[in-house]
Image (cartoon, grey):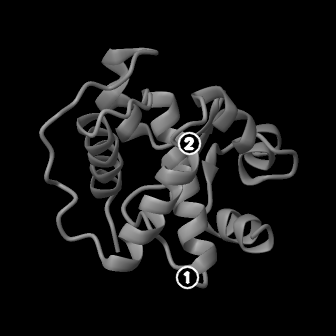
Amino acid sequence: MATVQQVTDFLLNLRDNDMEAGKYYSLSNLKLQKLLYFCHGIFSAVHQGRRLIVDENFEAWRYGPVIPSVYFRFNSYGQNDIPQIELDNFIGLQPDEIIVIQNVWNNLKQRSAFDLVEASHVSEGPWHNVYYNDSDNVIQHEQIVNYFGGHR
């Protein structure tokens, strides 16, 4: 069971490893939020509804699912890429967590932040249902499981 900080730092580490290998992929706060969402949803679908991120929930914001603590951690960079940061807070991730996060990164790293926003805004998806139908903006884990579990 991972914390949002572990998953966030591991995604940043994967980006940094690519940069060190001469491959550059953007990673803004907006794109990071969507990657976290897809990591969580895909992990839950693959692992019978288990949570990847156990300490916080996603909220339905204008540009898609957001974990507020991550947003506020990196909001000073605005629309710019998050710079390389020395990180080791992902220590403790389990092998099944690492595999899903790596697969999501490898499959989505070339997509733009707004491509991922569009993918997270799918009609009748968790974000859409909460943003347009609920007064409470929290996207419940069960909504994510139901959506990703039925769309593998």
Of helix, strand and loop, which one carries label 1? loop
Tell me: residue 21, above or below residue 107: above
Could you tell whether 75 is left or right of 36 in the image? Answer: left
Quadrant in which the C terminus appears: bottom right
Could you tell whether 97 is left or right of 147 in the image? Answer: left
Few, some or many residues within 10 Å of mark 1 (<14, 14–19, 20+): some
Three-letter residue code for mark 2: Lys
Separation (CA) of disc 2 from disc 1: 20 Å
Tell me: residue 17, above or below residue 114: below
Judging by the rendered image, the residue that carries numbered circle 1 is: 47
Residue at 26% across, 44% down: 17
N-term mark: 2 or 1: 2
Q: Quadrant of residue 22?
A: top left
Give 6 or 136, whichever is nearer the viewer. Answer: 6
Please count the marks in the image: 2
Residue 76, image x, y percentages: 31, 16
Of helix, strand and loop, which one carries label 2? helix
Which label was assigned to residue 34? 2
Q: Marks 2 and 1: CB-CB under 8 Å? A: no
Quadrant in which the N terminus appears: bottom left
